Amino acid sequence: MSAVKVAVVGAGVIGLSTAVCIAEGLPFSSVTILSEKFSPDTTGDGAAGILIPDVFPDIPLQRQQRWFKDTFDHLEGIIETPEAPEAGVFFSSGYCIYIPFVQGNEEIPNHKFGQAFTSIKCECLRYLPWLEERFRKAGGQIKREKVTDLQQLVNSYDVIVNCSGLGSRLLVGDEGVYPVRGQILKVHAPWVKNFIGGGDGGGRAYIYPGIDYITVGGTRQVDDWRLEVDMKDTEGIMERCCQLEPSLRKAQVLEEWVGLRPGRRNPRVECEWLQAGERRVILVHNYGHDGCGITLSWGTALDAVGLVRKSLLEQPTNAKL
């Protein structure tokens, strides 16, 4: 039986997760990642990487819960192995607090409420190279190239998996994908041990201790394509975060970073057919996770693999997995 040739477009956390799941989970597959950018130049490389789920409006809650649980279980499994430090995955505890508390139409001054919990932190600067090595060990191949037309891949592959994130706006003409600009700071403050999220309603504020630095953020600026650091945003981030943790005023700023999240009303995890001449191939989409890319990465990758398998079984002219 000849191998089914699979192209995964995109090498962010969604693309790499999907490629690994296909390479390891589907026998008789030959998987190639095609991407212009790899770590440390992906959006995920600047993400704080803490697993905190959001809710998307038009996807059944049970499916979203499965995505989160599958990702959490996958990362927890890594934590239980000696590879956890290399993969940049560890448990992290902290607080989400909110100031002020609003009751009815009245604001109660100086009243704090929130929750304490433990989650998982996944640092893509370590995790993505670790995933890439795992992909290579599974027999996967990597090509550094920019894909501008999926039609050009039809004659070379049996399955195309689109994990191009914000690039899907042009690659597949999805105008429902939009940039969500995020700016963060990486600071040296080793005395801060627990994450803190929340703020005073003036903007997003979070402090996430990591292995080598603390991520301090951030912004959520919709339809903003700017990749330059904005000093006003930097000042606002520091002011909001110092309200949560005053000792950060003494922290050394190591780096300022800007990235564009692939915003979408709902992640697109679905399948269709791509026709080019007389040849028809499977096209699976897995993109549009907004700020939940790391949080849902393994779960949506497993869903994508299921769509590939089901589609191959429904197309008798293609090899079966």
Image: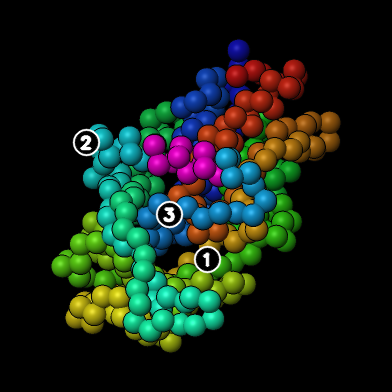
Estimate the x, y position of residue 100 in percent, counting from the top left: 41, 78
* Distance Cα–Cα, label 2 vs label 3: 25 Å
Label 3 is placed on what type of residue? Ile
**Res. 157 visible in picture:** no
Q: Give percent across and percent down for residue 182.
A: 48, 70
Q: Tell me the SS state at disc 3.
A: loop
Q: Residues within 10 Å of mark 3 (few under 14, many from 20)?
A: some
Disc 1 residue type (three-letter): Leu
Neighbour class for label 2 at 10 Å: few (<14), some, many (≥20)? few
Q: Which residue is mark 1?
A: 260
Q: 269 or 87, which is in the foreground?
A: 269
- Which tag, 2 or 1, sits closer to the chain's start? 2
Whether pointer 2 and pointer 1 mark residues with C-beta atoms closer than 8 Å, the reply is no
For label 3, the residue is 52
Mark found first going from the N terminus, 3 or 1: 3
**Dominant secondary structure of the residues highlighted in magenta in the image:** helix
Q: CA distance from mark 2 to mark 1?
A: 33 Å
Give whichever of 164, 5 is nearer the camera.
164
Q: Which contiguous range is marked in magenta? A: 64-73
Q: Amino acid at mark 2?
A: Pro
Q: Seen in the image, is 249 located left or right of residue 128?
A: left
Marks 3 and 1 sit apart, C-alpha to C-alpha, by: 19 Å
* Label at residue 82: 2
**Magenta run includes residue 172:** no
For mark 2, give the secondary structure. Answer: loop
Mark 3 or mark 2, which is nearer the start of the sequence?
3
Which residue is drawn at the image coordinates 55% and 19% (left, top)?
Answer: 28
Image-based side of 229 in relation to 190, left or right: right
Please identify the residue farthest to the left as the structure is shown. Answer: 191
Q: Left or right: where does residue 316 sit relative to residue 191?
A: right
